Each structure stands twice: as C-alpha cells, then as structure tokens.
Image (cartoon, rainbow, N blue to C red):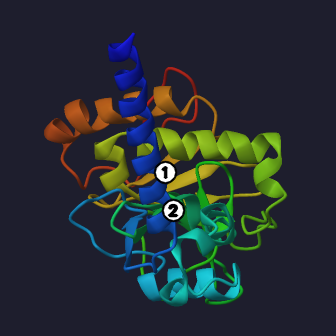
Amino acid sequence: MKISVKIILFILSILVTIAATEVYQRGQMIKNVHILVKNAAQNPQDTSHFLTEVEILKLVRQDANIDVSNLKIKEIDTRKIENSIKTNNFVSTCQVAIDSKGVLHIEVEELKPLARILNKNSTNGAYITETGKLIPLSPNFTARVMLLSSQKNSDTKLLDTAFWKTPNGKLFINALKEIDKKPFWKAQITQLERDNKGNLIAYPQVGEQLIELGSARNMEDKLTRLKTFYDKIIPIKGWGSYQMISVRYDNQIVCK
C-alpha cells in the first residue's frame, strides 16, 4: 500500500513539474524566429524563392497584427499566423510552431508553377499551377518553367481564371502535368502555343522543327510517339530534314 502511495506521489510530482515548466516557458519572451521556405522549383540547390523572409515577417506583422519580436510565448497565436501567411498568392501550405527553447518556427511551402503564361498585350503575365490557380510574377524569383502563349489574333484567355475551371482548361492542365513529370520533355519543350480551337504547337529546346500536338487530349500517347521520332528517325534523317512534326492524329507520326 505504501509503495502504491509513493508511486502516485512520484507521478503527481512529475506532472506538477511539467505543468510548472510549461507555465514558466509560456511566460517567456520569444527568443528567435526561424523561417524555412521550400522553394517553388523543388530544387534543394536553388535558394531562390517567390517570398523572402522579410516579406513573410511583414505578413505576420500586418495581416496577423503580431509583432513576434516583442511578445511572450503565451501571446503568440500560431493558427492566426498560419492563416495570415496562407492568404499570400505564392503560398501552398504553412506550419507554425514554438519549440521548448522559445524559438518560433515558420515553415512555408510555395506553390509550384507548371508554366508561365505570356501576355501578348503587355509585359505582365502569370504562372499557372497544377491546380489551375493563377499566381503573379515575382520580382524575387523567376521559375524555370515552360512558356504558354496564344496564337496571334486568338481570343483564348489564358490569363482568365475562369478558363482554367472549364473542361478545356482542366484538360490543358493535365497535358502540362504530363510534360512536366517527364524530365526529357520538361527540358525539351520550352513553349506551347494554343489557338482558338485548343490545338497546341510545341517549340523545342533542341532542333528547329515545330511540333504539332493537336488538342490537349491523350498527351501521354502523343509524347510516346514523339519520343519514337527522336530515338529512331532523327539518328537516320538528321536534325535538319523536317520543319514540322505532327502527332495530332492517333497512331501517326507525320514529318513535313
């Protein structure tokens, strides 16, 4: 019986110590702020970001109305900080936590752009993400992604958010994702041009042949046939033999 009482008292003393420590820690000032931004390029060697640490702290101060340099731990609303940072156009997710040493950790993951849309009417464009969200250009960072444009006199509104929510817009997104997920095509196709009917022309990094893809449908199959052209026809005919390669029609590779 005495042993049981001692065990209970020991456990209670531990709980009291933990509670007292937590109360003490929560009454301490924030010692430091550590910000980690995962870049949009998903490249650990690339330290460039759409958002800088200064801009993130500005979001916390202005949008969340929290001055992290002059507050106690108990006064920090981590959820409020997360929500304020998530309102930024470049942010995908955000996590905020305070460790036992009083350091406020802010981890931000930026949205990953699939392509950059060129605006034929001005110098301003935008990025399109894999979820169909348009995000603005940034003075801090230029993502190395494929370029998108509309044919001259085309009324395709690639910079219109509503377009990317339509069936054709979603189909286009899927085609972009298909190109993006394959390293060869991600490096080889530098620009896609779209006409009023949704047909696509690809401009390659290597070679002068234009690539006629047709609609955004069945992009995986079209890229497979196009790879056959590069692997089996180019070595025999050479790079300068054709001006146009078309895979728009099923089961065909047309060289002009």
Q: Residue at x 42, y 70 (%)?
A: 143
Q: Residue at x 64, y 65 (%)?
A: 86
Residue 226: x %, y % from top left: 38, 35
Name the amino acid type tagged 1: Ala
Looking at the picture, tell me which residue is in the foreground, 187 or 105.
105
Q: Is residue 144 above or below residue 224?
A: below
**Residue assigned mark 2:** 23
**Residue furthest to the top:** 1
Q: Is residue 222 visible to us here? A: yes
Name the amino acid type tagged 2: Val
**Residue assigned mark 1:** 19
Q: Which mark is residue 223?
A: none
Q: Is residue 192 above or below residue 5?
A: below
Residue 64 quadrant: bottom right
Q: How many other residues sit within 10 Å of disc 2, few (<14), some (14-19) or many (≥20)?
A: few
Helix, strand or loop under label 2? helix
